[in-house]
Image (cartoon, rainbow, N blue to C red):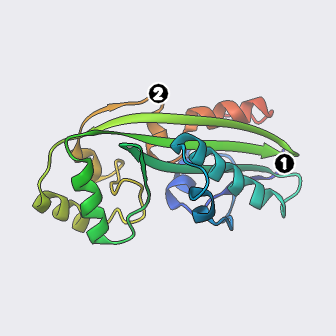
Amino acid sequence: MPRLILASGSPYRRTQLEQLRLPFEVVEPNVDEGEWKAVVTSPRALALKLATKKAEAVAQSHLGSIVIGGDQLVSFESEVLGKPGTADNAVEQLLRLCGKPHDLITAVVVLHEGRLTTHVDETRLWMRAIDRESAERYVDVDRPLDCAGAYKIESLGIALFEKIESQDHTAITGLPLLAITRLLNERGIAVP
């Protein structure tokens, strides 16, 4: 089996891929996301472009390896919301999302010897109405500063939602394992 590499700096994606019990390495890609955010306006296209660029960046120095790249973003009222970075920004993102639906777009690509296969998962989420005090309390406890949308749904963030529509609940955390399993099986890597 060729080496399997996850092109990501995300600890969440690493933990998810470990669920498949395959040997893999993690290599953080060097991709300027801001460069692509300035020129790709469709949230779906942007997520796919960033996932592709991450895989390509790692594949260049790991010839012969199977490289998995991923990206996730929140699309809210035609705007892409990224990682908040600070507690204040996280609270403001949550207050913007509360009581309204948004889309969580998760793209994944598998790249091996120039052959690229892709998958994009779109999850629709409805955050319940919360007040500033609840948002601040949540951010203080869960610290979702590195998460698109300012929530960790796999943790306390689940308490913020009233409804979720998803084809693959694992995509919400950052890596759609149903698609990854299919894409790897298509490459001859048996999972399980």
Question: Which type of secondary structure does the marked residue at label 1 adopt?
Answer: loop
In this orientation, which residue lies closer to the viewer: 156 or 35? 35
Q: Residues within 10 Å of mark 2 (few under 14, many from 20)?
A: few
Residue 185, label in figure: none
Q: Residue at x 63, y 37 (%)?
A: 180
Q: Residue at x 54, y 60 (%)?
A: 10
Quarter of image, res 111:
top right
The C terminus: image quadrant: top right
Q: Where is 163 relative to 11, above or below?
A: above
Q: Position of residue 97 (x, y in %)?
A: 27, 48
Q: Position of residue 121 (x, y in %)?
A: 52, 35
Q: Report the Cα–Cα distance between label 1 and label 2.
A: 29 Å
Between discs 1 and 2, the one toward the N terminus? 1
Quarter of image, res 89:
bottom left
Task: Please give left or right for residue 99 compared with residue 168 in the image.
Answer: left
Q: Position of residue 45 (x, y in %)?
A: 60, 42
The N terminus: image quadrant: top right
Task: Please give left or right for residue 163 compared with residue 82 in the image.
Answer: left
Q: Where is 101 relative to 38, above or below?
A: above
Query: Residue beneath label 1, please?
Result: 2
Q: Is residue 123 visible?
A: yes
In this orientation, which residue lies closer to the viewer: 17 or 58? 58
Query: Residue beneath label 2, please?
Result: 167
